[in-house]
Image (cartoon, rainbow, N blue to C red):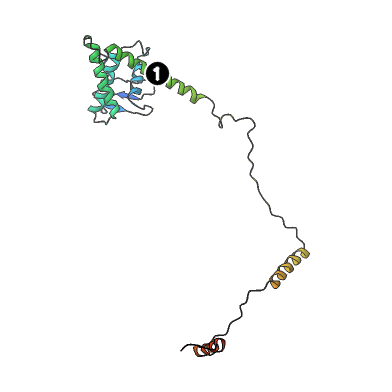
Amino acid sequence: MNEISGTEVFKEGQAFELASETSEAAFTVDLEGFEGAIDVLLALARDHKLDITQMSMSALADQYLAFVSEARRSNLELAADYLVMAAWLAYMKSRLLLPDIGADDEPSGEELANALAFQLKRLQAMKEAGECLRKRSQLGTDFFWRGDPEIFRRTYNMVYDASLFDLLKAYGSLQYRKGSASALRIEPFEIYTVEDALVRLRRMVRVVPE
């Protein structure tokens, strides 16, 4: 089992550092750049400077469990996936240490270790591919499509070239339109009282019932 107390676990970027027990800061952690527990495992694997598929998964599990133990001892809150990974690694290590009992419903320790190594190798490949993509020239920043239309800002300056005659003609036309237009006028109608209305009705129909 590899001892990690008092040593720097991640050399690349100094993402994680375990201080010695005599130091004032017992544990310092910076999770920038790590998106989950599997990233921590990959960084631990890189620290071995070995091929992921050739390194000891049991030693990797020991280092990760020690990392979780130190973090919890320092009263740091860990995400649930870190604790789940710790439990899974502990289970995998127990399967590696215990003899194979021939159970068909559960994978063997070597199968679990190979599956973990495959996941780490795939994650490493994705990170390398992403890094290659980030280093490539970006469209619209480093290079541009040929034939893109150029965008110009248009500025309009108003120029008045009307003469005094044109201004007088326009004013006269406006005054003529105002004079020719007539407003609608409704002639007021005569208003009758009740008595006058009865007299008028008698004249029109001759007979008005009382």
**Number of callouts:** 1
Which sits in the foreground, 16 or 175? Answer: 175
Relative side of 112 to 155, left or right: left
Point 29% across, 15% down: residue: 112
Image quadrant in which you'd find residue 42: top left
Left or right of residue 92: residue 153: right
Query: Is label 1 in a helix, a strand or a loop?
Result: helix
Q: Is residue 39 left or right of residue 158?
A: left
Q: Position of residue 108 (x, y in %)?
A: 27, 12
Q: Position of residue 117 (x, y in %)?
A: 34, 15
Q: Which residue is at the front of the view, 79 or 1?
A: 79
Give the residue displayed 75% in from the left and 67% down from the top: 168
In what quadrant of the picture does the N terminus appear? Answer: top left
Image quarter of residue 115: top left
Q: Residues within 10 Å of mark 1 (few under 14, many from 20)?
A: few
Residue topped by disc 1: 122
Q: Which residue does the image show at 78% across and 65% down from the upper left?
A: 165
Give the residue type that dot 1 points to.
Answer: Arg
- State whether residue 98 is above or below residue 198: above
Q: Residue furthest front?
A: 207
Residue 152 in sight here: yes
